[in-house]
Image (cartoon, grey):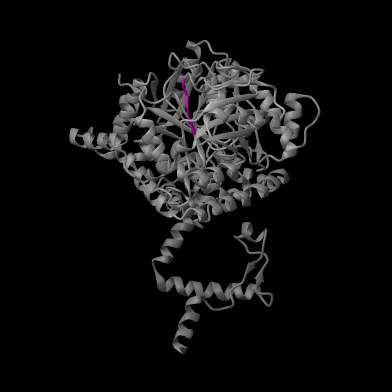
Amino acid sequence: MDIRSHEFQPRAVAALHDTSLQQAMDKARDGFVAKRAVQVAELSEFEALREAAKTLKDHVLDHLDHYLERYEAAVVAAGGQVHWARDDAEARRIILDICKRVDARTVTKGKSMVSEEIGLNTALIDAGLTVVETDLGEYIIQLAGEAPSHIIAPAVHKTREQVSDLFEKAHGGPRLTEIADLVDAARLALRERYFQADVGITGGNFLIAETGSSLIVTNEGNGDLTQTLARVHIVTAGIERVVPTLDDATLFLRLLARSATGQETETYTTISTGPKPADDLDGPEEYHVVLVDNGRSRMLAGPFREMLRCIRCGACMNHCPVYGAIGGHAYGWVYPGPMGSVLTPLIKGLDAAYDLPNACTLNGRCASVCPVKIPLPDLLRRLRHEQFKQSITPRRKRYALGAWRLLATRPKLYHALERLAARALAAIGGHAGRIRRLPGARGWTEARDLPAPQGRTFLERWQTERGQS
Amino acid sequence: MSTAREDILDAVRRAAGREPLDSATRATLDARIAKPVRHLRPAFDEDLIARFIRKLESRSGTVARVAGRAQIPAAVETFRSAHSLAPRAAVGAGLKDLDWPADWIIHHQRAGIEETLSVSPAFAAIAETGTLMLLASPESPTTHNFVPDNQVVVLETARILRHFEDAWAALRERTGGMPRAVNLVSGPSRTADIEQTIQLGAHGPRRLHVVLVD
């Protein structure tokens, strides 16, 4: 998928003025947060599980080479095949080759963010294949010709009316407006596709070294129909997805559904191991796993290693005030919100996504809900630092930061200027105590007034009041 | 020319600042795979059967309890007639021996696109979350769990285990290795993809009914 993160600012502004989007986001925001809070309150072990999950993931990352080798050996022992892809182009080529070899015409897909990351759909369609997204949210945005705007709820930005429009155009027939009827219409439209499919592609929430299995969780059952009914099943997953055992996967599963959708568990958790045995009555004839690096091993080496603990629950975006205000599309690539603002520059380049690490208030809500305790605000700050070091930060901002540093390291000068500024702003504010327009800060005052200081700085008052007590 | 596999593994090792692991470390890690680490598990005092039923029902599953295996067909018939379903079913061969009503059309093959009702044997269940565990085999095809609108699962109360880890232990003890698919099912299919409104029967079964055998 092409990256448009450099258009973040105009796209964010457009999002704020998009009434359908705002309507949809209003409905989503509070639901995710409230449902998660209920589940967390019900599980007294939740905090201890977060800490254990962090420790476990760090253990896996420390020994990733070994667990990957063990996983590969177990997949092969179960009759499956493992393919390694250094980057997105290599991953696409591997999958296209498999599709060609088995003479595929129709490909069904369960939701997979890695497949979005590697731009798989376009490549398959360009090769003449029919690609059908089967997750309801993915199906909706495929009809709309859009990218997902959330990693677990891809069509969260769509209102029911918009879905009605899309379905009317795609399916024909009378316009449906009830959610139950819309869900049924998608069910009907996709049913035959599952049975026609030559290749079924899914993601993998976890890859289990012990058994050589891939594990997916869904609520709809679409991933299962995809991987059971197609002749060939292909799993796409990042190399960091491997865990040693089923017990280890369980530790993450206890956190995943609660953090993602605010459920104790998703409806379906499926562990797939190899192709159909001779005696079984269903299942794919071939089972492939494509292990995708695409920047992950590079991340492993540096200060952003902790990002590889991510289990893709989406809690960080659900709790992000910026994401909540603008939705996912403004971020311009596959992964939005806080985790996306870290991943996008790391995978696509610091300069390709300059605004993302900066579109953050560092309020810390994302880190406080992350099930594997990724210090997202710290990583975002670190990215800003890297941007500054590599001179990607715009010149004006670099000068401003340089000037600020000059002052901040000279306290006497800083306080003197601060006193001056406080008095000047108080004078501008006048009786109302509010500043309606301020040269150089138009972006801020355009939408609201700036409360004016009352004449003295905090430090001055502190010294006086402390002197009195 | 180096392969992608070598390149990726080398990059991972370089990131860790080391050569391939020595054999002692590898043996320790392999032992960790062979004997899984015991993680923290949610504690609860509730009776396993009561919890299983409560949790499953909280996600719109339904449960009927019967005293013995012989009563299974009657319980399925009650479910079938309550929902006015045609007397046709895909029945897992693991339940072939039961005395199914003579006027039913039943088969033991994979589920076809028109399938409306399936009856499958569960391997176990997990009380922690009220989750059924079904294993793919000739006796229990995976399509039975996802294609029909109505899914009936037969579960023996003795097979209700406490935690997921207990289910993994049972799986490891079983002969024949990993089944191709382990399906953990916690309710009927659902979606909230349109305006966060929960709707049952997204792609999989609209109803999930458990016949619990004492």
Q: In this view, does A87 lie to the left or right of A263?
A: left
Where A107 sits versus A344, above or below? above
Q: Is residue B11 left or right of residue A136?
A: left
Where A135 sits versus A99, above or below? below
Quadrant housing the N terminus of chain B = top left
Residue with the most extreme bottom position: A468
Q: Is residue B135 magenta?
A: yes
Which one is in front, A248 or A436?
A: A248
One can see residue A115 in this view? yes
Q: Where is residue A403 in the image (x, y as percent from the top left)?
A: 45, 61
Q: Quadrant of residue A133?
A: top right
Q: Position of residue A312 (x, y in %)?
A: 49, 40
Which one is in front, B36 or A192?
A: B36
Residue with the most extreme right position: A174
Q: Position of residue A98 (x, y in %)?
A: 47, 15
Where A445 sits versus B3, above or below? below
Q: Which residue is found at the position 59% from the left and 77% from the top?
A: A454
Of helix, strand and loop, which mostly describes the magenta segment?
A: strand
Which one is in front, A35 or A350?
A: A35
Q: Is residue A82 left or right of residue B91?
A: left
Q: Which residue is found at the position 58% from the left and 15% from the top?
A: A128
Give the extent of the magenta segment.
B133-137
